[in-house]
Image (cartoon, rainbow, N blue to C red):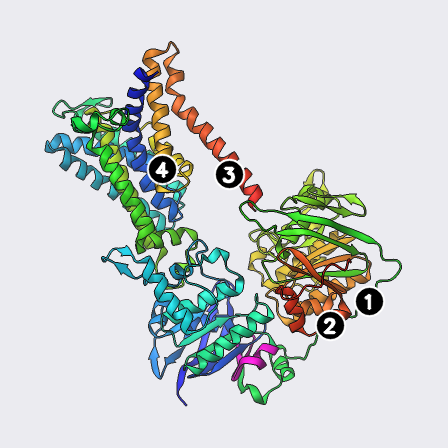
Amino acid sequence: MMHFSIPILHSAVTIMTPLLLASMGGLFTELSGMLNIALEGLLLTGAFFSVVFTYFTGSMIAGTLLGIGCTMLLSAILASVTLNLKSNVFITGLAVNLFASGLTVVLSFALFANKGVVVFDNIRPLPLLGTPRLASIPILGDIFIGHSAFVYLSWLLLVICYFVLYRTPFGFRIRATGLHQEALSSLGMRPNAYRFASFLISGFTCGLGGAMLTLNLGAFVPNITAGKGWIALVVIFLGNKKPFGLFIAAFIFGLADAFSNYAQGALNIPSDFILAIPYVFTLLAMIGSSIYAKNKGAIES
Amino acid sequence: MELAVEMLNITKTYPENNLRANDGVDFVLRKGEILCLAGENGAGKTTLMKVLYGLEDHEEGTIKIRGNQENISSPMVANRLGIGMVHQHFMLVEDFTVAQNVLMGIEPRKHRISYDLKKAVTLVNEVIERHHFSIEADMVVRNLTVGQKQQVEIIKMLYRDVDILILDEPTSVLTEQEIESLFSTFRQLAKRGKSLILITHKLREIKAISDRVSVMRNGKMLGTYETDEVDERQISALMMGKSISFFIEHTKKDDESRPVIEGRKITVLRQGQERPLLNGLSFTAYSKEILGFAGVSGNGLGVLEAVLGGFIPTFDGKVLHNGKDITNIGTALLRKQGLAYVPSDRLHIGSSLKATVQENIIVGESGSFKKNGFLDQKRVTKHTNDLLQRYSAKATAQMPIGTLSGGNIQKVILAREIERYRDYIVFSEPTWGLDVASSQFVYEQIASLRDKGAAVILISSNLDEMLTIADRIIILYRGTRVASFSGDEARALSKEEIGEYMLGIRNQGDRGA
């Protein structure tokens, strides 16, 4: 049992990180009262621009920061069309998703004359962090040590996310915006300002999450996000809209994904079925959680 | 005499319906006085105050605060000028504590970025103690009573050093005792030099609390009077243009009365709460009788309404309709079996705001308006217009019901429900937020249903209403029946005595009813 479960758990931690990052940003928009379905498009934008800028600048840090900048710019456009021009957030989010998937392919063709997978030879694999001492901790060391900086950064950001939401005036106002926006507007504050900030934050975390996807690979694959932004949306609800709930929910999805990667090589089942595991799992998890919520609601109300 | 507010020649037209809500209104508030702004629903009181608070702009007129002309473009500007407003609907975040609600926007900080939650509690507790409020700063708003939530709104304004305080219908959801304590708070505030404006249409309260009263009707200011120099009848006459008092005849239960709805030991539980929402409630509603359920909100009235309407399941006990078990059969079946029901939440449960008046009228009954499988629009419109006329509702069949005034929406719902009633009908808070004339209309309708033989169940936290029309009254406290009176017995008691039952200070034991 142990011999194969540890590598699966280890890779689950890597796989969950973009989900965790995207869902963190999504948590801000969700709490401010906006259903942000654009996470997928933002993640893809971050993935593309980070790897492209890393290629051109030769620096992963510069590339990631510029990628995040592009993603935040797109989320700012999304926010201003939604909030200032009062468009439906679902439609504008959909537009961002379609725009991102088109734009990345068009730019990829324009820059590299390639509509398919673009491999960047000068991008080295992400350095893996950890000390031998930490790595020697039984099981936990095997699972949680030896990941890239993105993984540990996402944990740090999760703590910051909790702190901001529950320990700063800004976080209280974001939550009040979603819970009862008149509580703010009747005191002369602008709920939309807090929604705008939430969109920017989701642009930031999605940019970072996207960067991890492509820099890990050293390549850009069209639609590399493959629904991760949508799953991140599910993670928000399964995590009960609590920062540390996100961690658990994202880990479970990471595990499902890691298992399907493992099963492709090890089990004699058509790979199409195996690749569907994370998505089937998403569906089952949503059905399960809504049944649970319904039963709970029926007793409470 | 120092003047706090002077509004001159204020004119405000709502472009949506071209309604002139304020027509050249003059208004003066003196420093340190309590002034009641009186008028029927739609007289323009709330609009005038929204202009003063910067929530509405105005086309004409000037506003002076403490003698200086000001342009109040937003609530922020109003706050800065020391003007605060407590809205009829609370602007509170239920999941936050009292302190977090009060300090929204002016949070104390630690190390510049983090929210100093401990200091927040201390700061707000200081204000609470200074003004002798009964709540604590670290209580979560969700767990407060309506009266306490109102205190939070007032504290919110006091914390901001407001010295001109506007309160929109502050007593509409409070009990007698809560009103008394609210009024003593108002008097203390006035003594400290704060100036208060109370928007109200309750005559008794105007006499009880105010120094002066300004009366509006149809968007115009009729005048401002020293409260001592006018009596209730005069104020009422100004407000309505004619004098009205409620008069409803009471009938004795006669031999032909028969039980229609029976509740047997109804118990409703909620997860995570030890105390049942309804605790073994038994009652019988007879035909030709108005059975009232009175109590302070939060003590089971709403739950009883939801049980009778079929929205929530009971944990134990039975509801019988003419002896037939209708417990937990759900709203759809209840309606089929003859439930007629005027809900307290007329805007969400009682009507579909975006649908037209006629759609709201035929909803649930659309089957009987079919012709060749399609709706017979002409017949629907005719039916609707008949009803609108009979119930003197100011509306047309094709208007979205959400554009009507509260009183007219209630008339449309009444029309629909009375049309479908068979032998019993449930009213919950039927006159909540309605003006005197509309209330009288509702009472007359209820009484005439009773006279026609209906078993009427009236659920209401308005004690005046209970005493006016109920033939029998059951008082609920914490989900338990603590007293029952015949209407005459109840009217012989003082309101304070009944209030003591409602607040659980007294308990009559179960006498059976």
Residue that label 4 marks: A246
Give how far across and how far down residue A94 sits, in percent: 37, 37
Residue that label 3 marks: A293
Q: Quadrant location of the N terminus of chain A?
A: top left
| Residue B2 visible, this angle | yes
* Inter-mark Cα distance, 2 to 3: 47 Å
Q: Which residues are magenta?
A: B204-221
Q: Are marks 4 and 1 in contact (CB under 8 Å)?
A: no
Q: Secondary structure at mark 3?
A: helix
Residue that label 2 marks: B491
To which chain does the residue with label 4 belong?
Answer: A
| Residue B219 visible, this angle | no
**What's the mark number on residue B251?**
1
**What's the mark number on residue A247?**
none
* Inter-mark Cα distance, 2 to 1: 14 Å
Image point (52%, 76%), residue name: B183
First along the sequence among labels 3 and 4: 4
The residue mark sitting in front, 4 or 1, is 4
First along the sequence among labels 2 and 1: 1
Q: Where A60 sits versus B424, above or below? A: above
Image point (41%, 81%), residue name: B192
Local crowd at mark 3 within 10 Å, few (<14), some, or many (≥20)? few
Query: Which quadrant would residue B299 be assigned to in this image?
Result: bottom right
To which chain does the residue with label 2 belong?
Answer: B
